[in-house]
């Protein structure tokens, strides 16, 4: 259901876009992990017990994919290789949300003419999956900056993540709108004064952005 949100008091000058769950499927979420674990005959419950701590470090850029997999999968001999496992991780992260991507592309095309609204990517993601997904799924050059947790060492919903986005965009909070599929992330942005839109469906996001004066023709 579409929710009424207050109109921005000033013109929106920057849009902050989550990646997984808004523009693409999530890179390595609960469903992806279950699928890949079961594909290789692993106990999903055991995998999840080992996942949380190294995943936090991995998404902050503190460890690499190889170290993550050593702690979650290859702590014991396996009948498959690390390369096989990584190939499956990539395969389940390859789905676009075409309507949202098309909308952002139209915004970008308008922006190149009007030099108006900034467009920024804000994502909790590992370096390896994001480095794969950005070129593979045609996201190169679509955003003014790519604020990825593994690149900047911060994760949503930490307030410093959003402060970093404001500093990089050089915008005041009330000039920015943040779109994410997770309520805790949207709530954290709103606490700083950023306008928040929680993604439920592509059409709902497009309608709510229209109320804020963000439209793509």
Image (cartoon, rainbow, N blue to C red):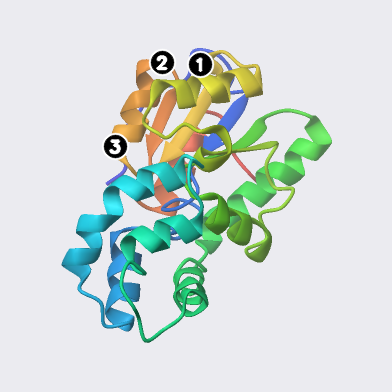
- Return the mark for residue 4: none
Packing grade of label 1 (10 A; few <14, some 14-19, many >=20) is: many
Q: Residue 183 carries which label?
A: 3
Residue visible at 42% across and 15% down in the picture:
193
User: Under tag 3, what secondary structure?
Assistant: helix
In the picture shown, does residue 187 fall above or below 53? above
Tell me if residue 124 can be seen.
Answer: no
Please tell me which residue is depicted at 25% across the width and 77% down the height of the picture: 42
Residue 152 x/y as whole percent: 56, 33
Find disc 2 in the rendering and name its residue.
192
Residue depicted at x 61% and y 16%? 171
CA separation in Å, label 1 and label 3 = 18 Å
Where's residue 52, x and y in %? 28, 49
Query: Which quadrant of the view contains residue 49?
Result: bottom left
* Mark closest to the chain's N terminus, 2 or 3: 3
**171 vs 84: above or below:** above
N-terminal-most mark, 1 or 2: 1
Residue 78 appears in the picture as rendered: yes
State the residue position of label 1.
Answer: 173
**Tally of marks:** 3
- Please say if 155 is above or below 83: above
- Please identify the residue farthest to the right as the structure is shown: 113
Please say if 19 is above or below 14.
Answer: below
**Which one is in front, 173 or 88?**
88
Asked if disc 1 and disc 3 are in contact, CB closer than 8 Å, the reply is no
The residue at the point 29 percent across, 55 percent down is 51
Contact check, label 1 and label 2, Cβ < 8 Å: yes
**Residue at mark 2 to residue at mark 3: CA–CA distance:** 15 Å
Reading the chain from its start, which is encountered first: label 1 or label 3? 1
Can you give x and y, in whole percent of width and height, for residue 56 in the image? 37, 43
């Amino acid at each position: 259901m579409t929710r009424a949100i207050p109109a921005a008091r000033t013109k929106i000058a920057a849009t902050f876009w989550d990646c997984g769950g808004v523009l693409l499927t999530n890179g390595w979420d609960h469903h992806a992990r279950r699928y890949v674990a079961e594909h290789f005959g692993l106990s999903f419950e055991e995998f999840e017990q080992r996942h949380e701590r190294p995943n936090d470090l991995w998404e902050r850029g503190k460890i690499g994919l190889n170290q993550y997999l050593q702690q979650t999968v290859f702590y014991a001999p396996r009948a498959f290789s690390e390369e096989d496992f990584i190939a499956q991780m990539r395969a389940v992260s390859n789905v676009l949300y075409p309507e949202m991507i098309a909308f952002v592309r139209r915004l970008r095309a308008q922006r190149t003419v009007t030099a108006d609204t900034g467009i920024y990517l804000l994502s909790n993601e590992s370096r390896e999956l994001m480095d794969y997904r950005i070129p593979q799924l045609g996201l190169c050059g679509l955003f003014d900056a790519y604020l990825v947790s593994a690149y900047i060492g911060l994760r949503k919903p930490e307030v410093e993540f959003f402060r970093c986005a404001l500093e990089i965009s050089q915008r005041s909070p009330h000039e920015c709108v943040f779109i994410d599929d997770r309520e805790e992330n949207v709530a954290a942005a709103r606490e700083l004064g950023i306008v928040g839109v929680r993604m439920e469906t592509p059409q709902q996001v497009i309608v709510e952005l229209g109320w804020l004066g963000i439209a793509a023709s």
